[in-house]
Amino acid sequence: MMLDQRAMSTLGAGSREAARVTHLTWFLLIAAAVVYVIVIAALLAAVLRRRGGVDADVDTTPVSVRPVIIGGAVIPGVILVALFVAGLGAMRAYPTPVGAEPIRFFVTGHQWWWDVSYRDASASFRTANEIHVPVGRQVEIQLTSADVIHSFWVPRLHGKIDVIPGDTNAIRFTATRIGSYRGQCAEYCGLQHANMAFAVVVEDSASFARWLAAQGQQAASPVSADEQLGERLVVGGPCAMCHTIDGTPASGRVGPDLTHVASRAMLAAGTLHNNRATLEGWISNAPSLKPGVLMPALPQFTGRQLLAMTSYLESLH
Amino acid sequence: MMRTLRVRSWMLRTTSVLLAGAMVACGPGDHSDVVAGGSPARGRAELGAVGCGSCHEIPGVRGARGLVGPPLGGIAERTTLAGRAPNTPANMIAWLRDPQAIEPGTAMPNLGVDERTARDMAAYLYTLR
């Protein structure tokens, strides 16, 4: 799982669309290798060919232009046309024609995180930086940006696509392999461009249905005294100005939705693993961990309050 | 002159280590091998995995640049932990495992660190002089 997350290789395809690109890559690579070997062999033959000893005069045998035309124009022309046609074939898959009922997500790029929203007849929710999709079903992701141009790229699932403010682009793919796939902004977008990652989790349809149902729920109510104190501080404090926690008065839209923040594997768009220590460090002083982030340091809380806020956020599964 | 100084500081260090060993089992400034059975290499990896670096600057731990708690560079030389407990390996291990027991109300959470892991972490921290 972890390995899958980290792999940013275009070769280990996890979807039909990525498999086409992988096949094209191998075809181009092998074709190039064959041409390379032939050219180097011809070069070596020319260099090593005996020209009648060191003392011989310049070779004056008349040269035929036919091999030059065939080897220098006709054969390369045929090869290039073949590669072009193969490339067109792979490009035709982009975007895949929309199927009967794709699972549809709306993703908005922000400096430096990904807002994800989903709505259908049964569920409607927002989350961030982590998208779950079912294996074998077509998925459409509609993309736009809230600020600058970003690029949405999960190399093992699909090619890059620009994420442009004021415009909507879409990708469609059908995942074929279960696993967690790392994605990354692929268009330089400012200071924390490198820490603008996300995950696409491909799972079986039962797990996906469970995820969908859970994400559609309102936030869990705090149970322990610590969690209750935490909720009061989070919902009644500065956090609520920027973050939404569905089912509480916290309804800010500037930062990621925190309704189910504890269900996510990573924090701050792939910057940190999501655990108790990182969560508290992030709440208290986010800019120290991701300089330039819009979330300010919050030095007004006591240790006890920070622990309580962390406990509350940790309970939001 | 240089040579004399070096020899002298070497002698001083040996003497102080011997003295420290004789007087108290462990004290601030002791070497990591004093943390019996602790592995600095494992401890360093654990400090990263647990997420200590989101609150502390820890030399040698990747991404450890948090500015919530104190930086841990030179922690081996410090005399107190949490401003109240003498900086001994035993106290360090206890602190890593259950900071709330030593300093109730501290922002440092109990992170479910077991004895072995705490020992390894302490072993690494005592290499930071």
Image (tube, helix red, strand yellow):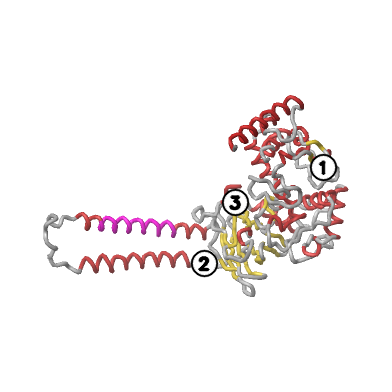
Type of amino acid under label 2 = Tyr
Q: Residues within 10 Å of mark 1 (few under 14, many from 20)?
A: few
Name the chain under label 3. Answer: A
Residue A137's place in the image compared with B119, above or below, is below
Q: Is residue A123 visible?
A: no
Whole-angstrom CA distance, mark 2 to mark 1, is 62 Å
Q: Main secondary structure of the magenta part?
A: helix
Q: Label 2 crowding class (10 Å Cα cut-off): few <14, some 14-19, many 20+?
A: some
Name the subunit of mark 2: A
Q: Nearer the viewer, residue A167 or A211?
A: A167
Magenta run includes residue A261: no
Label ID, residue B83: 1
Q: Nearer the viewer, mark 2 or mark 1?
A: 1
Which quadrant of the structure image shows residue A42? bottom left
Residue under circle 2? A94
Q: What is the x, y in percent for residue B12? A: 67, 31
Residue A214: horizontal and vertical position, in percent? Answer: 74, 54
Q: Nearer the viewer, mark 2 or mark 3?
A: 3
Task: Give the labeled residue for mark 3.
Answer: A5
The residue type indicated by label 1 comes to Gly
Same chain letter for marks 3 and 1:
no
What residue lies at 73% left-to-right and 49% top-to-bottom?
B55
Q: Secondary structure at mark 2?
A: loop
Locate residue A76, reporting x and y percent: 31, 66
Q: Which residues are magenta?
A: A24-43
Vertical order, A259 against A253 (above or below) = above
